[in-house]
Image: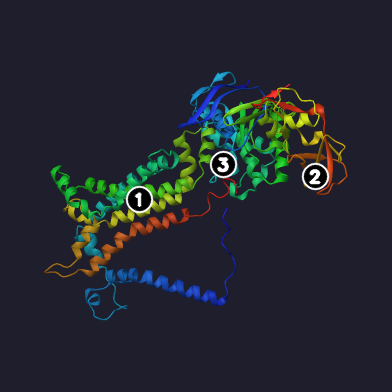
Amino acid sequence: MSAPPSTRPLHPGQRVAVGGILVLMTLFAGFPLLWVLLTSLKPNNAILSKDPIFLFQPTLEHWERVLFTSDFLKFYLNSLIIAAATVTIVMVVATLAAYALARYPMRASKDISFFIISQRMMPPVAVVLPIFLIASNIGMLDRLETLIAINVAFNIPLSIWMIRGFIEGTSREIEEAAVMDGASWLGAFWRVTVPQIWPGLLSTALFVYIYTVNEFLFASILSGTNARPVSAAVALFLPTGVRGTLFGEAAVAAILIMLPGIIFAALMQRHLVAGVSLGAVKG
Amino acid sequence: MSAISIRSLHKTYGNVEVLKGIDLDVADGEFVVFVGRSGCGKSTLLRCIAGLETISDGSISIGGAEVTRLPPSKRGIAMVFQSYALYPHLTVRDNLGFSLGLARQPKPQIAQRVARVAEILRIEDLLDRRPVQLSGGQRQRVAIGRAIVREPEAFLFDEPLSNLDADLRVQMRHELMQLHEELSATMIYVTHDQVEAMTMADKIVVLNAGRIEQVGTPLELYSKPRNLFVATFIGSPRMNVMSAAAARQAGLAVGDAAERIGIRPEHIAIGHAGSGQFNGTVGLTEHLGADSYYFVELDDGSRLNVRRSDDVMLSRGERVGLTPNPGYLHQFSADGARLD
């Protein structure tokens, strides 16, 4: 068992230094978010002002336009459907595959593992043209299923590797104890191991979600007006010859895109309690 | 009836044969201990009985019913693991009741059986704790409780005390023996600890390289080891072994067929130089309080370990004479088999 983290109190000077660093890091990470939030509420003249403006009369005109007069909500829903389906399929498939690789070592395990991760080494742009041609030939362009399939394919390898690591960190004897107690092997995995690796599974799901929502290349090439997700749809608010950039609307879109991820992370925070498996086996 | 019968059991991993034809009968209510060196197959044999390993050939029956192809949960046995293997996310209460929950027992009955087991093992105060909040001994009790609560036909223990400190190990050993008396259940216990094997077992099974070398009561194994392996494995410190030729030369009555002679440290008398059948010089000594062990370098270069239980202390370098008790000589043939 590793030593518990030190609980030695900090010197007052150390506390000031640590506090200062934390404040700086928070500002660095948080300022762009604050700026986007302010931009979404600024009138256009304040947005376009040469000097940064922090005090202004807030307006909801950009929010109204994005939510009620543009197609953004439709694209937003597309993104949520693609992300939810991708996360669900990836988590089920990757968890089962990782379980097999972690618990049933065979002669080809190493090769299989390397083959899986090697799929992730290929730059997506290398296959975008063939995939476009295939999708076009079988009539699958501009469909949610196509984007879900692409995202699943690209997220499974790394997810298998991540989850396999979590499973290998747990004791097989605990699963065997559950089997002796009357569970099936898969039942033992589900009842005994999954609760132990739950934080890891949630982190993996968040990772897959973020990747999927941000996926731009295939989204922009394989989707049209019907299946377009927000990552491609944000371009609606970017410069066009006549209209110029709609900064306020782009800011609203950015906030909406970030929102589910933030909610998801906030909800799973309480599950990220370390040490749940301590004491289960000798130590 | 929960007798266990194993016939021609073979277990191979790829090209490696780990168990090479095991035949064994464990009577109902018997406490049997498997001993052997690391890698001899004792834990694998236990896991085969549990059903955690599929066997390559042979058969296993428990309580008269063939269970060779049955999953672990259908064999009517419970197992206590070396690492305790408690469910970390569940309280002690839920750990104990896990198997009953899987068997869809009614909740009041689960609570009743958990409470009874907690009382037997004196862990009533721990029921709402999680494994992480327990000491090693408490975790071991919970692991044993989890096995008891199922009221199995037989219990399997895989080196359950090896992670405990010495004091606690002795205490838990006594508790397990008491439990065996109270439950009158068949128990199979794997250990590499000789003291556990000798003190707990009704019957010891000595395994070596995937084969059973001997099955017998602790005293049978100690006083009549079937071969040289058992002779040197059972007993601590180990039996002295010397060539039969050297023994004959020293005037010991040794049969013609004997190639090797074994004599335990407590069966050699130690006296003044010239007074015994062997002369030597005291080398390394170990004083354990009640007993002292002297490693005596004989004049022919070999070494005998001698136990002395009196207060006389010998010092290193002292010349001594050794006299083996002829009634306790063990004679072995060239292939290591016992000659009687």
Label 3 chain ID = B
Q: CA distance from mark 3 to mark 1?
A: 29 Å
What amino acid does circle 1 point to? Leu
What amino acid does circle 2 point to? Thr
Q: Is residue A27 left or right of residue A14?
A: left
Q: Tag 2, which secondary structure?
A: strand
Q: Position of residue A28 (x, y in %)?
A: 38, 72
Which residue matches tag 3?
Answer: B85
In the rendered image, which quarter contains the N terminus of chain B? top right
Q: CA distance from mark 2 to mark 3?
A: 51 Å
Which residue matches tag 1?
Answer: A158
Q: Is residue B264 left or right of residue B5?
A: right
Q: Earlier in the sequence, mark 2 or mark 3?
A: 3
Residue A72 visible here: no
Q: CA distance from mark 1 to mark 2?
A: 68 Å
For the residues labelled 3 and 1, say whether their Cβ atoms are less than 8 Å apart.
no
Q: Is residue A229 left or right of residue B297?
A: left
What amino acid does circle 3 point to? Ala
The residue nearer to you, when weighing B285 against B40, is B285
Which residue matches tag 2?
Answer: B281
Label 1 chain ID = A
Image quarter of residue A12: bottom right
Q: Position of residue B201 (x, y in %)?
A: 70, 30
Q: Tag 3, which secondary structure?
A: loop
Q: Residue at x 35, y 47 (%)?
A: A114
Q: Around disc 1, counting alpha carbons within 10 Å, would you say few (fewer than 14), some (14 to 19), or many (20 or more)?
A: some
Q: Is residue B8 left or right of residue A126?
A: right
Q: Tag 1, which secondary structure?
A: helix
In front: mark 2 or mark 3?
A: 2
> Hey, which residue is sitting farthest top in the picture?
B64
